[in-house]
Image (tube, rainbow, N blue to C red):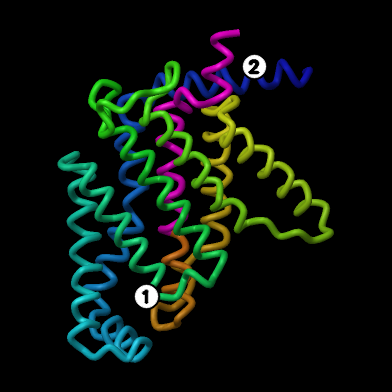
Amino acid sequence: MAPADVMGTAEELADQFLRVTKRYLPHLAHLCLICTFLEDGLRMWLQWNDQRDYISMSWGCGMFLATLFVVINMVGQLVGSVLVLTRKFVPYSCLGLFIIIVLQTIVYNILWDLKFLMRNMALGGGLLLLLAESRSEGKSMFAGVPTVGDTSPRQYMQLGGRVLLILMFMTLLHFNASAFTIFQDIFGLALVILVAIGFKTKLAALTLVLWLMVINVLQNAFWNIPSHRPMHDFLKYDFFQTMSVIGGLLLVVALGPGGVSMDEHKKKW
């Protein structure tokens, strides 16, 4: 088959998948997106003393401030996640979860670790898409602000969310001489570029979802590591963080790329 025929067949399959899952896909996307916040919030509860002692020793801030941070982290993530799942006060929940991401980036010194910083930014992209979904075109949080052409703040949120989400894949590139690794890097880069510019967006995002799910299961199999080993928590955190990015990509599939994309501009050609 010619490449154009293969692409056409793949797009038909993607469209058929969307028709079948249209009612359930947003709910699945929400669950995947907030699962890292749920897991981290529960971990704060189950490892209360360890988390408090770590903060106290790392920052020398004393038990009161360390306890306050753990409480804010735990309550903010659990309450925000529940509100997102129940679709209550979603914009405020997104803001609260974004603040948690910023706090964790600072407190855990993620700011100086490029890999974890990019993954946290990808999480922020998922929240931006969730915020865009919660806003109808007629009820933008920027109501009254003039827009350019047919674009709106919601569509810029979708653009920003798409661009931030692809940062997750930049952390998966290996840059070695293996033929398979080179193919994997080129294939992945091509897909993330398509998502970023909004070309064949739904097909590219759905392909990335499938690819990332396989990589996540193979590379972050925390269930194979005894729970008392530090690697267990590390892989578990990585696994659920990756699931949140998958949730963001599923929102891209469900919502489409928005007005600031090549797919949208193609309709005008």
x 45%, y 59%: residue: 120
Which circle's residue, 1 or 2, is located before the other in the chain? 2
- Where the N terminus falls, by quadrant? top right
x 75%, y 54%: residue: 181
**Residue carrying label 2:** 8
In this orientation, which residue lies closer to the viewer: 118 or 222?
118
Identified by mark 2, the residue type is Gly
Q: Quadrant of residue 138?
A: top left
Q: Position of residue 37 (x, y in %)?
A: 31, 58
Q: Is residue 36 left or right of residue 180?
A: left
Q: Tell me, yes or no, whether the highlighted magenta stretch contains residue 232.
A: no
Disc 2 crowd, CA 10 A, few/some/many (<14, 14-19, 20+):
few
Question: What secondary structure is marked by label 1?
Answer: helix
- Where the C terminus falls, by quadrant? top right
Q: Position of residue 40 (x, y in %)?
A: 31, 65
**Residue carrying label 1:** 107
Q: Quadrant of residue 65?
A: bottom left
Identified by mark 1, the residue type is Val
Dominant SS of magenta comes to helix
Q: Is residue 97 left or right of residue 257?
A: left
Q: Which residues are magenta?
A: 240-269
